[in-house]
Image (cartoon, coloured by chain):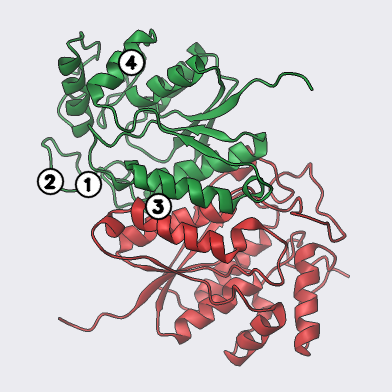
Chain colours: A green, B red
């Protein structure tokens, strides 16, 4: 039997966390397949960033799957009638997209099964995050258990592993780790209200978390802001 | 507080099982929202059947969400290069669509959260079925557990219930129950190779299971066959 390289799917949104995860997965020796989802998010600059990152990092294949979550609605990210808040909200904010990570991981699981892979990386974080329930360790554990019951691979004895290397890191720790790996964060778009050129608003939840990360890491913030 | 009617989402493929589930849910007093998924399945007659059923059964709303699972491939149902088998296969057959029910339930979960509902009906069956892993009770239980961790509703104390009233019934028992509820199975399309008019091939897995069900129930089979 010839040596088989390790292979993994990386969920690549185009944001800071997902690029860090891709760099980490490659450093761990995984050949990476990148999966992005065009779910009707208003910040389409994010997907352009994902495409650019996929090319720069020479992933084996980059798939952008289109699914219209705007048809379901219920989030400021997919419904332009709901404004992006410019202040931190208490509780789970309106930018929460119902069942988003469940859906993204379901797509990754399906593709993993077709490719014969057992490793999926996702850049969820439960420290400097917006309180989305589907970013927490208990969700990830429950999804992994379900995945092994849901699939042909699971039934036949293969086990899926969800890798969440950032889940317990602060944003500053994530950024430091990325910089150590040589990541150029100018490639990424975090802002929910980014303009067509990917320039950030500086005031939404995602911008605030990102800014705070660079400040706390005592590293220069390379983000391009709108003003 | 005024009386609130019970409301539920029903996954409606357009096949025999899903129509039976819709009729059962309505009989149990649920106001039903129907969800169908246009996932690139080759048997588009199924979706036409779903639309017709949704109208006849006066669901509150019928949503057809489009997602291109053909981009992932790996199944005879979404890849026209893989033929639909005309004989029963051992093991999990090529018509298995990787992670399909995980994905469908994720979509239902997202919509349920937006609508503020806690009940989802799905017509999975683990008796007269094709051996798909995501039709088994242990998968459904694991998904329900994950769903309550994945969502705002779950975090805030609401609990989702996945209703699978057919999961342990034989096809004949499902059909008898449907007939008791006044279901007209001519409305449904089960065949993987149905033609544009919804006429069935009579030889694929889905056709065989359906035929056997009517025979064992000793009821006339109303299915329109191609020959």
Q: CA distance from mark 2 to mark 4?
A: 29 Å
Image spot of residue A8 (x, y percent): 56, 28
Q: CA distance from mark 4 to mark 1?
A: 30 Å
Q: CA distance from mark 3 to mark 1?
A: 16 Å
B107, A163: nearer the viewer: A163
Tell me if residue B191 comes above or below residue B31 in the rendering: above
Q: CA distance from mark 3 to mark 4?
A: 38 Å
Q: Which mark is residue A177?
A: 4
Read off the residue under disc 1: A94
Along the polypeptide, which appears first: circle 3 or circle 2? 3
Indicate the chain on which mark 2 is placed. Answer: A
Q: Is residue B222 visible?
A: no
Image spot of residue B175 (x, y percent): 67, 83
Task: Identify the secondary structure beneath mark 4.
Answer: helix
Residue at 72% across, 72% down: B128
Indicate the chain on which mark 4 is placed. Answer: A
Q: Quadrant of the C terminus of chain B?
A: bottom right
Task: Identify the secondary structure beneath mark 1.
Answer: loop
Read off the residue under disc 3: A71
Indicate the chain on which mark 3 is placed. Answer: A
């Amino acid at each position: 039997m010839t040596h088989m390289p390790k292979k993994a799917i990386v969920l690549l949104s185009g944001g800071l966390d997902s690029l860090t995860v891709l760099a980490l997965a490659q450093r761990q020796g995984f050949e990476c397949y990148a999966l992005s989802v065009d779910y009707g998010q208003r910040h389409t600059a994010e997907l352009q960033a994902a495409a650019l990152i996929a090319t720069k990092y020479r992933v084996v294949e980059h798939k952008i799957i289109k699914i219209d979550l705007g048809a379901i609605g219920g989030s400021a990210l997919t419904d332009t009638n709901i404004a992006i808040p410019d202040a931190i909200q208490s509780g789970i904010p309106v930018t929460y997209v119902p069942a988003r990570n469940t859906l993204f991981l379901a797509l990754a699981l399906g593709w993993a099964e077709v490719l014969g892979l057992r490793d999926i990386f996702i850049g969820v974080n439960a420290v400097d995050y917006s309180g989305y329930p589907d970013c927490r360790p208990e969700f990830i554990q429950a999804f992994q258990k379900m995945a092994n019951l849901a699939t042909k691979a699971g039934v036949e004895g293969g086990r899926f592993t969800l890798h969440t290397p950032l889940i317990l890191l602060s944003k500053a720790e994530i950024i430091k780790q990325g910089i150590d790996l040589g990541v150029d964060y100018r490639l990424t778009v975090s802002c929910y209200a980014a303009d067509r050129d990917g320039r950030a608003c500086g005031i939404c939840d995602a911008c605030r978390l990102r800014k705070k990360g660079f400040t706390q890491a005592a590293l220069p913030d390379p983000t391009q802001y709108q003003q």
